[in-house]
């Protein structure tokens, strides 16, 4: 089965399985992790991420099995908007709109940063609702 263009796929390994959750370890690496000089450089950022995904009762997996963790590409774009684009827009709007009102640049900057902090607080308060929207699933490697 060919990978669809509208999916984001990462390979991982199943670490633990119980009736509620399947724990998968993903090795995420930066672009320089494939460089032949990464051992000498010390700049490679290879690290393990652990995801706990709901166990699919209709598919049998075993610990240590290599799998693919998938999500829709639209979920990745939505995450970028929520995490980076909207906070940047809030910061710029506050800085530019407060310029004629507040003459002190330091105060203007602090208020703008506080506005972004308030945005992230609201995101944190709605984290349960957001976690229901971001769906990952496991697929066997073929």
Image (spheres, grey):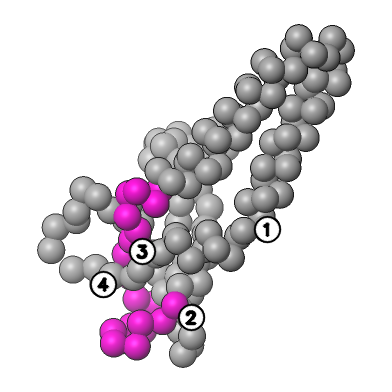
Q: Position of residue 4 (x, y in %)?
A: 19, 54
Label whose residue precedes the other's in the sequence (4 or 1): 1
Judged from the image, the secondary structure of the residue bearing numbered disc 3 is: strand
For residue 36, what is the image quadrant?
A: top left
Label whose residue precedes the other's in the sequence (3 or 2): 2
Mark 2–mark 4 Cα distance, whole angstroms, equals 16 Å
Mark 4–mark 3 Cα distance, whole angstroms, equals 9 Å
Label whose residue precedes the other's in the sequence (4 or 3): 3
Label for residue 125?
1
Label for residue 21?
2
Pointers 2 and 1 in contact (CB under 8 A)?
Answer: no
Mark 3 neighbour class, 10 Å CA radius: few under 14, some 14 to 19, many 20 or more: many
Mark 2–mark 1 Cα distance, whole angstroms, equals 24 Å
Q: Residue furthest left?
A: 1
Q: Residue at x 73, y 40 (%)?
A: 117
| Left or right of residue 25: residue 90 | right
Label whose residue precedes the other's in the sequence (2 or 4): 2
State the extent of the magenta-drawn residues as a range.
Answer: 54-76
The residue that disc 3 covers is 69
């Amino acid at each position: 089965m060919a990978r669809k263009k509208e999916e984001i796929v990462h390979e991982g390994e199943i670490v633990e399985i119980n009736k509620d959750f399947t724990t998968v370890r993903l090795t995420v690496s930066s672009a320089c992790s494939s460089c032949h000089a990464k051992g000498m450089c010390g700049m490679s950022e290879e690290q393990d991420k652990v995801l706990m995904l709901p166990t699919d009762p209709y598919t049998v997996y075993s610990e240590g099995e290599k799998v693919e963790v998938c999500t829709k590409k639209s979920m990745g774009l939505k995450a970028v908007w929520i995490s980076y684009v909207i906070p940047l827009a809030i910061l710029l709007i506050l800085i530019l709109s407060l310029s004629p009102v507040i003459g002190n640049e330091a105060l203007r900057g602090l208020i703008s940063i506080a506005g972004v902090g308030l945005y992230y607080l609201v995101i944190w308060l709605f984290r349960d609702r957001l976690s229901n929207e971001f769906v990952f699933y496991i697929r066997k490697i073929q």
